[in-house]
Image (cartoon, helix red, strand yellow):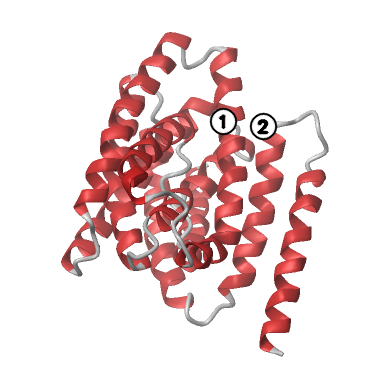
Amino acid sequence: MYIYYMLTGFSVGLLVGLTGVGGGSIMTPILLIFFNVKAAVAVGTDLLYAAITKSAGIFAHGKLGNIDWRIVKQLSLGSVPAAIVTTLYLSDLGVSSASTVATIKFWLGIALLLTSLSVLFRNELAKLSETGRWVKSKYVPAATVILGATLGFLVTLTSVGAGALGVTVLLMLYPKISITRVIGSDVAHAVPLTLLAGLGHASLGTVDYNLLGSLILGSIPGIWIGSHLSMKVAEHWIRILLAIILVYVGQKLAFPEYNPLFGVCFLLLPIALTQIKHKKAKA
């Protein structure tokens, strides 16, 4: 099985390198659906995987001056307590109980649906925020703390949210800050958050270290190749395909009683409208 885990790590790393989308939104559903890894183990293992693979990003962004530590501090004020409380909540539920599995699957589905929207419409939301703030200046620090708490809950419970979702909301809260600085700040916050949440899962026994090692070995060359191919590949279409996949899987996990194609069809409408708008703008 470990060769398949390495190939999975490579594939996810390739997508991360091509699109910049957090691996959690891809890795956890794959482990859960295709490899039948237990829900809590899939989340716990992926959290430590994310902490390790993203750790180099802190040094890279820090060296380039792309981290706003004020934003990181405000996010952490919300995320750290939320991560601790969520870990205690999972401990009380029992990581193997039916209610825990159902809770993780539901919130993982919700996180994937939100991530799909942020993947698809991040640029449009960023452009809208340039015309005016979504939140008044005096409320931005409090909103950042609330964002941190939301991410702390989602990341600890599902391993999803620290990447695409965090960056998208930060762009809306801080429209005057460059996107590279926003991404750097998000990475600087995501690494300790995923590490804290991952260690919390480790204390609950929900980390498979053999699986973790295989994923890391596969992802390193995948990320390297993907980052070098990103300038040669139509990243826009990859994002559309990725968003459709995330909607399909997200609805299947959160709302299994509905046909998952319903969500895909619902997403195709704004995609089509966006493409028509781009064509008219070029004309």
Tell me the amino acid under the disc marked 1: Trp
Q: Residue 184: give x, y in percent of width and height.
A: 30, 60
Q: Residue 22: give x, y in percent of width and height.
A: 45, 52
The image quadrant of residue 196 is: top left
Residue to which mark 1 is pinned: 107
Q: What element carries label 2?
A: helix
Residue nearest the observer in this picture, 217 or 231: 231
Image point (46%, 34%), residue name: 154
Crowding around mark 1 (Cα neighbors within 10 Å: few <14, some 14 to 19, many 20+) is many
Q: Residue 5: give x, y in percent of width and height.
A: 50, 46
Residue nearest the observer in this picture, 122 or 251: 122
Tell me the amino acid under the disc marked 2: Ala
Residue nearest the observer in this picture, 225 or 63: 63
Quick check: 107 left or right of 211? Answer: right
Image point (49%, 68%), residue name: 18
Image point (38%, 38%), residue name: 47
1 vs 93: above or below: below
Q: Can residue 186 be seen in this view?
A: yes
Q: Residue furthest bottom?
A: 283
- Whole-number angstrom distance, CA of label 2 to CA of label 1: 7 Å
Image point (77%, 58%), residue name: 268
- Image quadrant occupied by the C terminus: bottom right
Residue nearest the observer in this picture, 160 or 212: 160
The image quadrant of residue 105 is: top right
Crowding around mark 2 (Cα neighbors within 10 Å: few <14, some 14 to 19, many 20+) is many
90 vs 20: above or below: above
Q: Can residue 205 be seen in this view?
A: no
Q: Is mark 1 on a helix, strand or loop?
A: helix
Residue to which mark 2 is pinned: 254
Residue 190: give its label: none
Cβ atoms under marks 2 and 1 closer than 8 Å: yes
